[in-house]
Amino acid sequence: MATNDTCCSSAPYFKAHEGKLEALKTLCDQLVQKTSEEPGCLYCGFSFDGDQTFCREGYENADAWLAHLGNIGEIFGEMLKVSDLTRLEVHAAASDVPKVRKTLGDMGIEAQVFALEYGFRK
């Protein structure tokens, strides 16, 4: 079964620097508030396990996710001062994978980018 689902989701993982977990949590809250105003955002949230942080977020399509990157650039930069980005996965429609890879490459961010081939969205 092929898919017509265009959802683009990303899963960044962060590790807080020593003594910086509360600062990271403050920035996560700011990012969620800012992201909640984006028209193409379907969901966004942060989970914690000790000093490890996971963000789950989904967007209507890759263009909405790329717009999100531009919207949160300042907060993301602050997050990288108090934590390390330890892993990033992006899941996008196969037709969007090249532009996602190019944008991340231009930003100097390593990610594993998956092409969505099968599925459905209700």
Image (cartoon, rainbow, N blue to C red):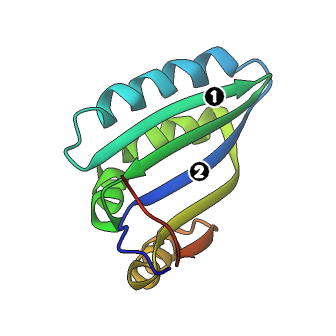
Q: Mark 1 to mark 2: distance in Å?
A: 11 Å
**90 relative to 37, above or below:** below
Residue 86: x %, y % from top left = 73, 50
- Residue ID at (64%, 68%): 110
Q: Residues within 10 Å of mark 1 (few under 14, many from 20)?
A: few
Q: In the rendering, which numbered label is found on residue 17?
A: none
Residues at discs 1 and 2 in contact (Cβ within 8 Å):
no
Quarter location, residue 3: bottom left
- Residue ID at (55%, 36%): 79
Residue 9: x %, y % from top left = 48, 56
- Residue ID at (77%, 26%): 51
In the picture of the structure, the residue carrying the numbered disc 2 is 11
Q: Left or right of 38: which side holds 82?
A: right
The three-letter amino acid code for the residue at tag 1 is: Ser
Q: Earlier in the sequence, mark 1 or mark 2?
A: 2
- Residue ID at (50%, 36%): 78
Q: Secondary structure at mark 1?
A: strand
**5 relative to 115, above or below:** above
The three-letter amino acid code for the residue at tag 2 is: Ala
> Which residue is outermost to the front?
1
14 or 9, which is in the foreground? Answer: 9
Quarter location, residue 60: bottom left
The number of discs equals 2
Q: In the rendering, which numbered label is found on residue 47?
A: 1
Q: Left or right of 93: which side holds 17?
A: right
